[in-house]
């Protein structure tokens, strides 16, 4: 398979067609070889217009996916990333989005809760000097590196915990998809002078990340 041609076709038919016009985002998608960030058996599916499974479900552990190119590109464009941005990526999986971010941003901390995925990310990102892979619960963020200009949550969440928002610097923003299924919406949270505002932008159905379910309340 000609992966370079498949990459160009993905950008032309899946990314540009969904109003992604950011030069830096398009360049990143054309540059990073998506096929190296999926399991061997899935390489021929790396550029399909869908999510690609990178880790199968197991007892107590949900399946994990590499996000479909179109919503991922739209979210990265929404983030308005600059070369000055220090980024925390939450849920890096095998490192594909980390690689994209390393081309667009200044430096990236890639957080992953699954040790096997984190090890794979470290291997695949060995040539990306601006990325550091760390492990820990996703919902806790990575306080040791805070504050961040941008926190990019690489999957859907039921709610954004205050712990994560507290790791933004003043003027920093957090990008996520809140909610599950077709009712989920892309949101930008902005920290300003000790308060956090949020804005809703578009519907986006993406796979959920573990650890972000709302705490259930007892009703008497």
Image (tube, rainbow, N blue to C red):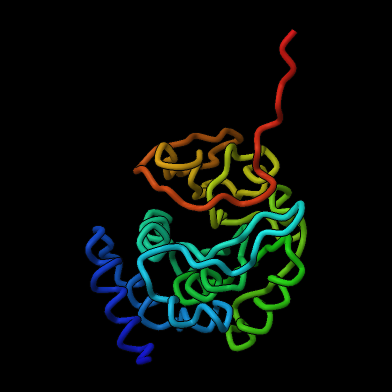
Where residue 203 appears, x then y in whole percent?
36, 43
Residue 50 placement, left or right of 166: left
> Quarter-wise, where is residue 69 in the image?
bottom left
Q: Quadrant of the N terminus?
A: bottom left
Residue plotted at (54% across, 53% down):
155
Asked if residue 152 can be seen in this view, the reply is: no
Q: Quadrant of the C terminus?
A: top right
Q: Is residue 166 above or below residue 27?
A: above
Where residue 77 appears, x then y in whole percent?
37, 59
Residue plotted at (27% across, 78% down):
9
Residue plotted at (60% across, 61% down):
64
Q: Is residue 79 above or below residue 166?
A: below
Asked if residue 12 can be seen in this view, the reply is: yes
Where residue 170 appears, x then y in whole percent?
57, 46
Q: Nearer the viewer, residue 79 or 206?
A: 206
Residue plotted at (61% across, 73% down):
94
Q: Nearer the viewer, residue 36 or 153?
A: 36
């Amino acid at each position: 398979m000609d992966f370079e041609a498949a990459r160009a076709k993905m950008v032309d038919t899946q990314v540009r067609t969904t109003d992604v016009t950011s030069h830096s985002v398009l360049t990143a998608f054309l540059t990073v070889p998506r096929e190296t960030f999926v399991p061997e058996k899935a390489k021929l599916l790396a550029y399909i217009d869908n999510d690609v499974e990178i880790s199968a479900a197991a007892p107590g552990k949900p399946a994990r996916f590499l996000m479909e190119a179109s919503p991922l590109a739209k979210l990265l464009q929404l983030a308005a990333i600059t070369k000055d941005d220090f980024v925390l990526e939450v849920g890096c999986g095998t490192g594909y989005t980390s690689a994209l971010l390393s081309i667009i941003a200044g430096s990236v901390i890639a957080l992953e809760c699954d040790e096997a995925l984190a090890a794979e990310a470290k291997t695949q990102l060995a040539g990306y000097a601006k990325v550091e892979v760390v492990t820990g619960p996703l919902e806790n963020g990575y306080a040791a590196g805070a504050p961040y200009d941008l926190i990019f949550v690489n999957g859907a969440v039921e709610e954004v915990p205050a712990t994560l928002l507290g790791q933004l610097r003043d003027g920093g923003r957090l990008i996520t998809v809140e909610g599950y299924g077709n009712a989920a919406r892309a949101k930008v949270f902005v920290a300003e002078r000790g308060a956090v505002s949020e804005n809703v932008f578009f519907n986006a159905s993406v796979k959920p990340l573990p650890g972000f379910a709302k705490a259930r309340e007892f009703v008497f």
